Image: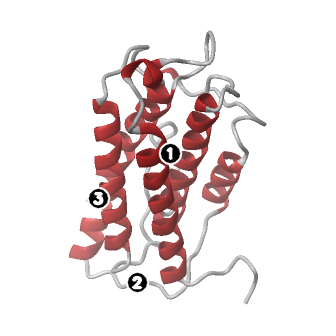
Amino acid sequence: MSATTRRTTEFLDSLAADLRQVRETVDRRFRPLTDDQLNRGPGPGKWSVGQCLEHLNIVGGLYLPVISKKIKAAQERGSKPAEMVAHGFIGKRMTESMRVPATEKAMKSPQQYAPSGFRLPRTVLEVFSRQLDELNGLIDQTRGVNANAIRIPNPIIPLLLPRLTDALELLVVHMQRHIAQAEAVLDGQGVSRE
């Protein structure tokens, strides 16, 4: 068995653990912030904590309903889970590029996925929390289907159809990247706008 081969249950357990860590960071570091702290960016053209969360909410709002629909369709077809996780070439490359910290390599987000404003209400935290719950529920539902066989259209390039395994991992890694970016804002390091 190669070093990159993983059991599906181990892979999904790892994603769920990563989400718990994201939630812990959000609850510990971001919930106590005042409105001003939530919206204070490190400088011109750089995102605030609230804008990082708003970006994640926008991306989650695009991916999560599609993932839910695809899982439901697989359940209705009687899909059974695969023992081992399979990753596609494109999905793996997308995820690996997202693993590079924003402090080392800034990426420009397409305009439609950029935060909507500079003064965001505290509801940005509540929406993000609900999306964490939803993603965690989708990971649980994935345990009952063959995630390797389910293809999720990429919202930016719809012709790209990564496997559900890759889409879930990409969402979690994307969250980790922007949560780290938001923490850097709090720590006074500031990173480039993405």
Residue placed at 58% from the left, 31% from the top? Answer: 186
Q: Which amino acid does label 3 sit on?
A: Ser
What whole-number distance in Å separates the C-alpha atoms at marks 1 and 3?
Answer: 19 Å
Q: Can residue 130 be seen in this view?
A: yes
Q: Which amino acid does label 2 sit on?
A: Pro
Residue placed at 71% from the left, 42% from the top? Answer: 101
Earlier along the polypeptide chain: callout 1 or callout 2?
Answer: 2
Q: Can residue 161 be seen in this view?
A: no
* Occupied quadrant, residue 87: bottom right
Location of residue 147 in the rendering, given as x and y in whole percent from the top left corner: 44, 72
Mark 1 surroundings within 10 Å by alpha-carbon count, few (fewer than 14), some (14 through 19), many (20 or more): few
Q: Circle 3 sits on which residue?
A: 68
Residue located farthest toward the top when viewing the structure as drawn: 44
Residue placed at 51% from the left, 55% from the top? Answer: 172
Per the image, label 2 sits on a secondary structure element best described as: loop
Location of residue 15 in the rendering, given as x and y in whole percent from the top left corner: 50, 66
User: Do labels 1 and 2 touch, CB within 8 Å?
Assistant: no
Q: Circle 1 sits on which residue?
A: 159
Position above or below: 5 against 88: below
Location of residue 8 in the rendering, given as x and y in whole percent from the top left corner: 51, 80
In-image side of 77 versus 171 (left or right): left
Earlier along the polypeptide chain: callout 2 or callout 3?
Answer: 3
Quadrant for the N terminus in the image? bottom right
* Occupied quadrant, residue 133: bottom left
Location of residue 82 in the rendering, given as x and y in whole percent from the top left corner: 47, 84
Q: Circle 2 sits on which residue?
A: 81
What whole-number distance in Å separates the C-alpha atoms at marks 1 and 2?
Answer: 25 Å
Mark 3 surroundings within 10 Å by alpha-carbon count, few (fewer than 14), some (14 through 19), many (20 or more): some
* Front residue (pair 44, 172): 44
Per the image, label 1 sits on a secondary structure element best described as: loop
What whole-number distance in Å separates the C-alpha atoms at marks 2 and 3?
Answer: 16 Å
